[in-house]
Structure formats: structure tokens, C-alpha cells
Image (cartoon, rainbow, N blue to C red):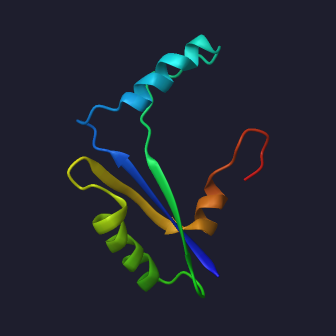
Amino acid sequence: MGRVVVEVMPKPEILDPQGKAVAGALPRLGFGGFTGVRQGKRFELEVDGEVTPEVLEEAARAAEVLLSNPVIEDVVRVAPVEADAATTTLAGGSA
């Protein structure tokens, strides 16, 4: 079984009240150095078999039609989860 990750973010010109709230909380909690926050959505889609270019194409179409609101959001990434895990690590080195 394969998985595809889809990431959706608000368009740059759209206000992001959740991101603004997080940005305000970070320094109050002792986290400095961050100048802004944008909050988006992440979806993981499971598929039977491996993730092929055709599966990624279908996921991208689903992202544009159902997973995002194209008026206020951009689909910023559609990728196999394996590729995502290889490039994303949490503090402490675990993926």
C-alpha cells in the first residue's frame, strides 16, 4: 500500500488568523527567531499498490477539486509519503 501527501496553504494575499495567533504565541512561550507563521492543511491519501505518476496525477486533481478551495488556497505539494519522510525530520532526528 502506498501513500500520497497533499499540502494546501492559504494564498499569500489571504489573511491567516490561525497563523497569526500561533505567531503571537511563539515568543510568549520562549520560541524566538520566527518572523511569521502560515497554517495550512496536510492530507495523506492511501492507495492500493505503489504510487505511480498516474496516482500522483489523480491525487493532484483531487486536491484541486475537493481538498482545497481554489479561491483562497493553493495546492503546494503532491508527493509520495516516502519522499516526504526522507526530507522531513523532527527535532531529535526521527522522521
The quarter of the picture where residue 17 lies is top left
Query: Residue at (31%, 52%) from the top-left corner?
Result: 74
User: Where residue 71 appears, x then y in whole percent?
Assistant: 20, 51
Among all residues in the image, which is located at the extreme bottom? Answer: 49
In the displayed structure, 25 sits above or below 3; it is above
Horizontal relation, residue 65 to residue 36: left or right: left
Query: Residue at (49%, 54%) from the top-left corner?
Result: 42
Q: Looking at this view, is 16 or 60 the one in front?
A: 16
Query: Residue at (50%, 84%) from the top-left corner?
Result: 52
Query: Residue at (59%, 85%) from the top-left corner?
Result: 50
User: Where residue 89 appears, x then y in whole percent?
Assistant: 68, 48
The quarter of the picture where residue 68 lies is bottom left
The quarter of the picture where the N terminus appears is bottom right
In the displayed structure, 15 sits above or below 64; it is above
User: Where residue 36 appears, x then y in whole percent?
Assistant: 43, 25
The quarter of the picture where residue 75 lies is bottom left
Tell me how many marks there are.
0
User: Where residue 46 appears, x then y in whole percent?
Assistant: 57, 75
Among all residues in the image, which is located at the extreme left? Answer: 71
